[in-house]
Image (cartoon, grey):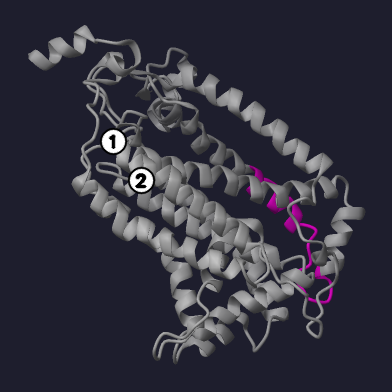
């Protein structure tokens, strides 16, 4: 965001002057994350998750590239090559555990980032494009994570691929041909593993490209903030460097402690023991379950147990599972409230904390539970509320709600009355 009071990059060293004239990378960095980028002074720690998401992406790309050097993308050797990485490659166990738990850490950070957006209205104008690109990133993450889960070629990898790709078969007419085209055959085999390996290696770089667009779009209107009030004067902002770089640095330190604790002390806590058994197409596991970050959408998929007229329950489940994410694309237009932050929207805040959050907790729990009662019924109730929240409650609340009074400026919300802003306003 270009503020008239933002500092311009003025190199002093002769080499940096020459570099700035020929290839202005230092100017770009300075404008993006340095003293030339001004951010609202009232950002809380919920705004640190975007930076953490970028860190997680870098961890995944670096560890993934090194792992790919030792992995064999063939059904005859995939499982053994994974064990080879764990046992014979120097620090291979740490790379593999770091990559697996890095995926979980990435989703924890991104889920927090998304729900911060829900609460503070970060999807509202003029930041719709930032939000839309963020949803695209999430969809790419889901696809990348699914394909990565298949690569170890254990029991859960094989049967997870069988179940998830089988969902395409629910689509009328084109479903089965689409599934066969995706797998390269009638069931997960060598062709499917090669395709998933290639795409799993490629998609993180696609995600990186969309992240760059996401950050670029962010710099046009600037960061949102907990009040939802736009920047009005120089006193509303501070330079990103050093203030928020230091704040992000503290969060990175805490994150790395927790991440390292998972990698070194409980690396298999979020995994499934069946995936340490080689894939066997002739033996179905007792309880097929995806990774934990898929659970809410898996619960929505399984919530449909009865056909609806001529529409099969399986097809309805598949459509609902994808719609659960696609509905986020329309959120900037479903929520018509002029107030962004839920801190000043008492009715919306109640539905968020006592409606959406409990529904998501139930979906997470039921997605990892067996497909039996009472979990199916709980999934149905939670899924019903989930869609009602975005499609019914949010539009109605945004129309009838009486928001609390907003502060005139960000500075006023932080420090009290802002004389400069008042004078600017009067002028």
- 221 or 72, nearer to the observer: 221
In the image, 134 versus 172, the foreground residue is 172
- Identified at 61% across, 67% down, the residue is 374
Label 2: which secondary element: helix
How many discs appear?
2
Q: Nearer the viewer, residue 102 or 216?
A: 102
**Quadrant containing the C terminus in the rendered view:** top left
Q: Which residue is mark 1?
A: 221
Does residue 203 appear anywhere in the picture?
no
Q: Earlier in the sequence, mark 2 or mark 1?
A: 2
**For residue 234, side relative to residue 312 (left or right):** left
Q: Which percent across, then down, holds residue 88?
A: 92, 54
Check the image and report above or below for 224 versus 11: below
Structural distance between the alpha carbons of marks 2 and 1: 10 Å
Q: Residues within 10 Å of mark 2 (few under 14, many from 20)?
A: many
Q: Quadrant of the N terminus?
A: top left
User: What's the mark number on residue 371?
Assistant: none
x, y percent for residue 320 = 44, 71
The reply to whether callout 2 and callout 1 are in contact (CB within 8 Å) is yes
Q: Residue furthest top?
A: 419
Above/below status of 307 relative to 50 = below
Left or right of 274: which side holds 251? left
- Identify which residue, 287 or 8, lies in the foreground: 287
> What label does residue 130 carry, if any?
2
Residue 215 at x, y = what percent? 41, 40
Q: Residue at x 73, y 69 (%)?
A: 157
Mark 1 neighbour class, 10 Å CA radius: few under 14, some 14 to 19, many 20 or more: some
Q: Residue at position x 43%, y 56% from top?
A: 136
Q: Residue at x 55, y 79 (%)?
A: 167
Q: Is residue 343 magenta?
A: no
Residue range of the region highlighted in magenta in the rendering? 59-78
């Amino acid at each position: 965001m270009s503020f008239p009071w933002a500092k311009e990059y003025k190199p002093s060293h002769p080499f940096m002057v020459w570099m700035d004239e020929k290839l202005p990378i230092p100017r770009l960095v300075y404008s993006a994350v340095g003293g030339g980028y001004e951010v609202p002074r009232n950002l809380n720690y919920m705004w640190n998750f975007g930076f953490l998401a970028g860190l997680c992406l870098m961890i995944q790309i670096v560890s993934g590239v090194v792992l790919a050097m030792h992995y064999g993308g063939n059904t005859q050797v995939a499982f053994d090559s994974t064990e080879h990485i764990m046992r014979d490659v120097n620090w291979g166990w740490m790379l593999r555990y770091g990559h697996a738990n890095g995926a979980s850490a990435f989703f924890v950070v991104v889920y927090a980032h998304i729900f911060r957006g829900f609460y503070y209205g970060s999807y509202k104008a003029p930041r719709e494009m930032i939000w839309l690109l963020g949803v695209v990133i999430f969809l790419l993450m889901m696809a990348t994570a699914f394909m990565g889960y298949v690569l170890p070629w254990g029991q859960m990898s094989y049967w997870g691929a069988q179940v998830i790709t089988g969902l395409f078969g629910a689509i009328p007419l084109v479903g089965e041909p689409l599934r066969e085209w995706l797998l390269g055959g009638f069931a997960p085999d060598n062709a499917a593993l090669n395709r998933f390996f290639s795409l799993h290696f490629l998609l993180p770089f696609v995600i990186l490209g969309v992240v760059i667009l996401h950050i670029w779009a962010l710099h046009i209107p600037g960061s949102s903030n907990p009040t939802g009030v736009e920047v009005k004067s120089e006193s509303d902002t501070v330079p990103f460097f050093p203030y928020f770089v230091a704040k992000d640095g503290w969060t990175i330190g805490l994150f790395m402690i927790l991440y390292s604790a998972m990698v070194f002390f409980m690396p298999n806590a979020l995994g499934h023991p069946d995936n340490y058994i080689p894939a066997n197409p002739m033996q179905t596991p007792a309880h097929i379950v995806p990774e934990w970050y898929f659970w809410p959408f898996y619960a929505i998929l399984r919530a449909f147990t009865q056909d609806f007229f001529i529409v099969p329950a399986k097809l309805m489940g598949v459509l609902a599972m994808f719609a659960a994410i696609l509905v986020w694309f329309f959120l900037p237009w479903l929520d018509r409230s002029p107030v962004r932050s839920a801190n000043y929207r008492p009715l919306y805040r109640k539905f968020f904390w006592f409606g959406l959050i409990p529904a998501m907790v139930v979906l997470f729990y039921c997605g990892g539970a067996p497909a039996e009662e009472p979990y199916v019924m709980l999934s149905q109730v939670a899924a019903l509320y989930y869609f009602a929240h975005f499609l019914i409650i949010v539009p109605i609340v945004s129309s009838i709600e009486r928001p609390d009074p907003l502060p005139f400026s960000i500075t006023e919300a932080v420090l009290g009355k802002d004389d400069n802003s008042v004078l600017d306003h009067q002028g």
